[in-house]
Image (spheres, rainbow, N blue to C red):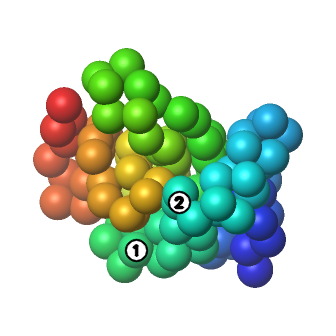
């Protein structure tokens, strides 16, 4: 089960760290309708990539003038490879992917 912004388990018992400040910022942004729930983002990722979420960060990005909220998600794949996904929290779109995919190709879609 997932609760709020902190994920305790996904596919197997795994500890996922989320900064308490991230949690409060996400709660506020969700209440204001600025972002979609983390659960919806994770469901989309689960459909595309097998593995366990090991870390989630929630951050505000205005470096490129976009002024948007992002989920940064680290996913440990069954193969042992680590994926790092940067997801637009407003619409769930994966903006950036680093690491090896299940097709064993190294991805870095900067």
Task: Give the secondary structure at mark 1.
Answer: helix
Residue placed at 37% from the left, 78% from the top? Answer: 47
* Of 96 and 108, the residue lying toward us: 96
Q: Where is residue 74 in the image (x, y as percent from the top left)?
A: 51, 45
Numbered circle sitting on residue 86: none
Gap between marks 1 and 2 measured at Cα: 15 Å
Residue placed at 43% from the left, 58% from the top? Answer: 90
Residue placed at 77% from the left, 48% from the top? Answer: 23
Q: Where is residue 46 in the image (x, y as percent from the top left)?
A: 44, 73
Residue extending farthest to the top is 63
- How many residues crowd mark 2 within 10 Å: few (<14), some (14–19), many (20+)? many
Residue 11's quadrant in the figure? Answer: bottom right
Q: Relative to 52, is 99 on the left or the right?
A: left
Which residue is tagged 1? 44
Q: Position of residue 84 (x, y in %)?
A: 41, 41
Q: In which quarter of the image is the N terminus?
A: bottom right
Q: Relative to 31, is 92 on the left or the right?
A: left
Numbered circle sitting on residue 35: 2
Q: Where is residue 2 in the image (x, y as percent from the top left)?
A: 73, 73
Residue placed at 28% from the left, 46% from the top? Answer: 95
Q: Relative to 97, is 86 on the left or the right?
A: right
* Dot 1 and dot 2 residues touching (CB under 8 Å): no
* Of 50 and 21, the residue lying toward us: 21
Q: Which of marks 1 and 2 is nearer the N terminus?
A: 2
* Of 30 and 88, the residue lying toward us: 30
Q: Relative to 15, is 104 on the left or the right?
A: left
- How many residues crowd mark 1 within 10 Å: few (<14), some (14–19), many (20+)? some
Task: Give the secondary structure at mark 2.
Answer: loop
């Amino acid at each position: 089960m997932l609760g709020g912004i902190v994920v305790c388990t996904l596919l197997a018992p795994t500890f996922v760290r989320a900064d308490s400040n991230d949690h409060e910022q996400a709660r506020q942004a969700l209440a204001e309708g600025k972002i979609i729930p983390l659960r919806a983002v994770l469901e989309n990722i689960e459909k595309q990539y097998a593995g366990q979420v090991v870390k989630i960060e929630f951050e505000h990005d205005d470096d490129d003038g976009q002024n948007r909220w992002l989920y940064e998600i680290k996913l440990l794949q069954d193969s042992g490879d680590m994926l790092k996904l940067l997801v637009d929290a407003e619409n769930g779109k994966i903006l950036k992917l680093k690491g090896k995919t299940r097709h064993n190709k190294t991805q870095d879609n900067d």
